[in-house]
Amino acid sequence: MPCQIILPEIRELMPSMVALRQRLHAHPELSYEEFETSHLVAEKLREWGYEVHHGLAGTGVVATLRKGHGIRTIGLRADMDALPITETSGLPYASRQDGKMHACGHDGHTAMLLAAGQCLAESIDFDGTVRLIFQPAEEGYVGAQKMIEEGLFELFPCDAVFAMHNWPGVPVGKFGFLSGPFMASADTVTIRINGRGGHGAMPQDTVDPVVAAASLVMVLQTVVARNLPPLDTGVVGVGTIHGGTASSVVPTHVELAVTVRALKETTRNLLLQRIEALAHAQAEAFGATADVSISPNAFPVLYNHPRETALARSVALEWLGEEGLVADMQPMTCSEDFSFMLQACPGSYLIMGNGEGAEGGCLLHNSAYDFNDTGLPYGASYWVKLVSAFLDPVD
Ligand SMILES: [Zn+2]
Ligand SMILES: [Zn+2]
């Protein structure tokens, strides 16, 4: 690791940062159950002189630190939750909790933001206000939205807010930035096809929801192919299909769960409308009916604001040069609930390398995933540098 580019103040914190990251990894907590994690985060921040609010959206922590007289405020966000996965990494600090695991690297996000917080409090001069936002329930349970509903930006106003995610496949020490739509919206549509059950030997007396569902699965594939302009991005995927109990029984209903992704809100709305229309039309074509519901745990498109993204990028460029940036960053069809924060406040979401090949680990959400500790000082240094750039101290 080229140590000279890591902030010396962060390099000093390396042993404690690694120890904390591995401790969090060994003790993962699921969405809205980040009790120990948030307690530890709040304790440390209080110790370093932050004004700490603990309990927004249940386990969320917002910590504020002021220096100088500057009126600008920057928010930095980390997510704290783990996933319902049984770990198979075999690491000495592998999860001690069966069925719970930090498979998305939120242990690393928390450790990096804490180290940056300590560094900002103890050794860095800036002019303004820093807010560190530790959110619960990023993994599908919209903790960011909950924090906003409970008054995040009214209680703790920010001029801009930033977040980063570790990314396997990208070398350690590289950061990725993209202005505009960066991550997709995510909706889950549940469709229940209601038929009339009966004896499988006498189909003429039934309305078979299995046939209607099978037809619907195929027809849904035409939505992206035939309804979207070819240069628009969309995903419509049937992830689950459940129905029936025996070959000789026509079931009363079949249920499908569909994932829907888009990089524009207009595309998202079009996809949802077409899915609903096709569900009803297909059911009707077979004499069945359809109930369609869209999950309230939905994520909007993550839109990076141009001015804040340009600043975030310039910080990495000045620090690491062109080789520190992911060339030709493209939008992604995964999703992230930081999108809610970016609807409420200008800001930017960026990625940082977790390493390439075996070093970077397998895919996120894999049962053997591990945050790469060599990336910790890069992420923590980046946060400190971003704050310094945003809250330039007066001479
Ligand atoms: Zn995740
Ligand atoms: Zn994640």
Image (tube, helix red, strand yellow):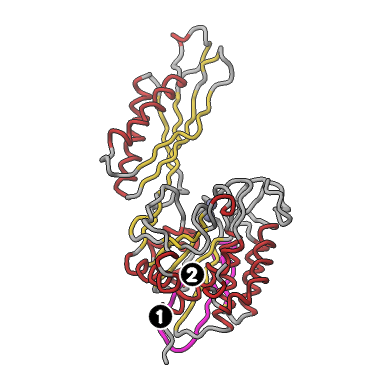
Name the amino acid, label 1: Arg
Name the amino acid, label 2: Leu
**How many other residues sit within 10 Å of disc 1, few (<14), some (14-19) or many (≥20)?**
some
Q: Residue shown at 43%/19% (left/top)?
A: 211
Q: Is residue 136 magenta?
A: no
Provide the residue designation for mark 1: 72
**How many other residues sit within 10 Å of disc 2, few (<14), some (14-19) or many (≥20)?**
many
Q: Is residue 61 magenta?
A: yes
Q: Is residue 41 left or right of residue 340?
A: right
Residue 295: mark in rendering: none
Q: Does dot 2 land on a helix, a strand or a loop?
A: strand
Q: Is residue 206 left or right of residue 118?
A: left
In the figure, residue 228 lies in which quadrant?
top left
68 is higher (above) or lower (below) than 383? below
Mark 2 beta carbon near ligand 2 (under 8 Å): no
- What percent of the width, then of the height, locates residue 273? 32, 39
- What percent of the width, then of the height, locates residue 310? 35, 68
Residue found at the far bottom of this picture: 395
Residue 34 vs residue 99, the one in the foreground: 99
In the figure, residue 55 lies in which quadrant?
bottom right
Q: Which quadrant would the N terminus be assigned to in this image?
A: bottom right
- What percent of the width, then of the height, locates residue 198? 52, 14
What's the magenta region? 52-76
- Please name the predominant secondary structure of the magenta segment in the image: strand
Residue 204 vs residue 268, the one in the foreground: 268
Q: Does dot 1 land on a helix, a strand or a loop?
A: loop
Q: Please count the marks in the image.
A: 2
Provide the residue designation for mark 2: 76
